[in-house]
Image (cartoon, rainbow, N blue to C red):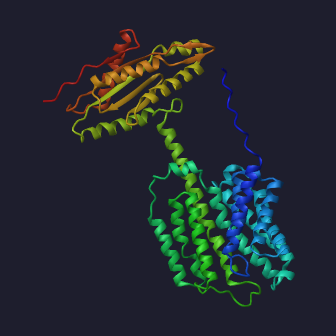
Amino acid sequence: MPVEPMVFPAQSRLLPYAALFSLTFALTIGGILARPIESLSLFWPVNAALAGVLLRYPRQATVSGFVLMWLAMVGADLLCASALAPALWFNLCNMGVVVTLWQLLSRLPRLHRRMRTPHGVLCVFGACAAGASVAASLASVMAAPWFEQSLRSTWLAWFSEQFSTAVLVLPVMLTAPAARTLLQGGSQKIRLAPLLVMLVSLAFSIAFGGPGAIAFPIAALLWCAWTYSPFLVSLLTLTAGSTLIVAVAQSLMHFSVPQSESGVTALMSARLGIAMLVLGPLVVACVTQANRSLLARLAHQATTDHLTGTLSRSAFTQRANALLESRQHQQFLPLTLMMLDIDHFKSINDAHGHAVGDQVLRQFADALQEQLHSNEVFARMGGEEFVIIVPGLAPDRAQFTAERLRRAVQDLQVEQAGQRLQITVSIGLAGCDEGMPTPDLTALLASADKALYLAKAKGRNRVEQAEPQRRAI
């Protein structure tokens, strides 16, 4: 009886939009419940968070998606007993931030959009200022009916809140790594000293007070920027910035501005100052991360053979000498060095071309990598010649490992123009048993090379062992 194939239902196109509506509704409810009664929100992360979500997952950044977000904001406001007209208009102001951030930042290359370059950081700050200006301008239109403030005061209040919140929240969304990356990096050690200094400086700034106190954590944040990833630095700037804003709002820092500045409050001034202070640490974190990535790439290129992905000859020499030196402090544990040479490799290049020869080298290296353990050193010495160091195994016991590698190469499937190329390898072994003195790397390579030529002389595709080293008296 034939088995019917399983049919899986296609994913609903409405599901992502339903998720976006639910997320917007939940964030708006949380922001409303957290704001003071009969006042603008002290900290409104909804707009920046939604813009970050759309920039990371842009499929729902459509007219329908933006309308759904606006309806979710309005519904949450009405549920919290807001009047219909203010709910419609002020959430249109909020959507002005989301749409502006999306329109400006979605056009950037991904490298800049994810704040991996100083140019990207500056673009994000500029987009946050533009989004805050749009929201403030729309809100000022309705200043007379719903606010007892002047047009200037309303504009400054909206701009300072929207700009500072976006600058603190959006970098967290844009620099956040994927969930898989977070799980893989969970075991990495994190230096606590910069974090502790930042927390202490933050507490000291609140205790000391005064307008200049908002700058106290900047040195610690710069230290964090040199130490941590841009994502962690973004989290720390969010923590420091939001804490300082709350402290100023609660009059904990005795922060004031001259009374002659009409419409400017201490909170407005503090918000703008805090927003500009976090620019420095974010740029430093971005530059530091870029330098680390560049150094890692340079180190990889210096130590890795570009064709096969194995260690380069120079890197092998360093690793091998370090291994031989450490052996002297480990009761002369056994060690084996294998010299490998692909049989008749020159004829492969001559008959099929160097491109096929490169393919053979890559597949050969991949096949051996799958057979080796993490503590075994594998390198390409040049051309078709490779070397492997197997610590902890004497040559007699490593003979079985070498045979396993030889069979893996013999079974290798290399296809060229519909034909299978037969690849074999000759292997020469040299090393020392337990309790033997540590040989010089040059002497060890020479012994393995002699054994390799012996394997070739006996017909190739075989393993030969050098004359064992005599026990020292």
**Residue at the far front in the pictured view:** 1
Where residue 391 appears, x then y in whole percent?
32, 33
Where residue 190 appears, x then y in whole percent?
46, 58
Name which quarter of the figure residue 53 lies in.
bottom right
The quadrant of the rendering that contains the C terminus is top left
Residue at position x 45%, y 26% in the image: 368
Residue at position x 24%, y 40% in the image: 330
Left/right placement of residue 71 relative to residue 193 reads right
Q: Return the residue nearer the eye: 257 or 394.
A: 394
Q: Return the residue nearer the eye: 105 or 65.
A: 65
Name which quarter of the figure residue 460 lies in.
top left
Can residue 134 be seen here? The reply is no
Q: Return the residue nearer the eye: 57 or 283.
A: 57
**Residue at the far bottom in the pictured view:** 259
In the image, residue 461 above or below residue 159: above
Left/right placement of residue 344 relative to residue 466 reads right
In the image, residue 246 above or below residue 170: below
